Image: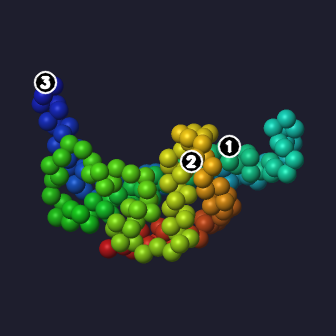
Amino acid sequence: MDKKSTYKVWRSSFRTANSIHQIWKLQAEWLFHSASIILDKALKAKESIAIIEPPKDIIKKGDSYYDIILDDASMNQALLLIGYGIENLLKGLWVNKNNPNKEQVESDRINSRIATHNLSELAKEIGLDLSEEEISTLNVFREIIEWRGRYPIPLNVTDYANSKREGYSKLLSGFTKTKIPKELNSILEKISNHK
């Protein structure tokens, strides 16, 4: 197949994928599965951290060794994958709402309305009725997706100064081996039940 024919195949495939909400849901399921594996390992590590002596040159007075280890360990990556999963579910619902007949989209770009990590805005656009706490949780996941789950700092000091530290800490503390934070559980239930 020549380059032009190959491009046409890829273009058609892209346009089809850009038209079907189930593809977004499937991607979300894969992300949640991967996150659960990482989360399980991170929570198991949490139990063994207590026997390790903290390095004195890293820990400052008042710091919790557990929080630093958990923050720097696999938890960020698990939360990043969960955030990506939520993002895919919301984008899939948006695609379904805006293309209910699953007509092939005649565009070579993803719709600009979903080319975002602003999860609370996506939820609002699809008509998801969320509490202030749930919106706050989505904003924490936005931060995780944009930088906290990938980089040690954001692109600028303003984002760093305005970071959702309190919400992030609350989200982290809500995870145990047997449950996820109630706000996250509530968001996932609302997404799952959304028509």
> Where does residue 31 sit, x and y in percent of width and height?
46, 51
Q: Residue 166, located in which quarter of the rendered image?
A: bottom right
Quadrant housing the N terminus: top left
- Compared across the picture, whether 126 is left or right of 60 comes to left
Residue at figure coordinates x 24%, y 56% from the top left: 20
Residue at figure coordinates x 34%, y 68% from the top left: 126
Q: Could you tell me how far apart the alpha carbons at marks 2 and 3 are, in whole angstroms?
A: 46 Å
Dot 3 crowding, Cα within 10 Å, few <14, some 14–19, many 20+: few
Quadrant housing the C terminus: bottom left
Q: Hey, what amino acid is under mark 2?
A: Asp
Q: Hey, what amino acid is under mark 1?
A: Asp
Q: Could you tell me how far apart the alpha carbons at marks 1 and 2 are, in whole angstroms?
A: 19 Å
Pick whichever of labels 1 and 2 is earlier in the sequence.
1
Marking on residue 2: 3
Dot 2 crowding, Cα within 10 Å, few <14, some 14–19, many 20+: few
Q: Residue 158 or 112: which is nearer the viewer?
A: 158
* Label 2 sits on residue: 159
Pick whichever of labels 1 and 3 is earlier in the sequence.
3
Q: Residue 15 or 33: which is nearer the viewer?
A: 15
- Extreme residue in the top direction: 2
> Where does residue 178 sit, x and y in percent of width and height?
64, 65
Q: Hey, what amino acid is under mark 3?
A: Asp
> Where does residue 45 sit, x and y in percent of width and height?
72, 49
- Compared across the picture, whether 34 is left or right of 168 comes to left
* Label 1 sits on residue: 72
Above or below 132: residue 84 = above
Residue at figure coordinates x 55%, y 57% from the top left: 140
Pick whichever of labels 2 and 3 is earlier in the sequence.
3
Say whether marks 1 and 2 touch (CB < 8 Å): no
Marking on residue 183: none
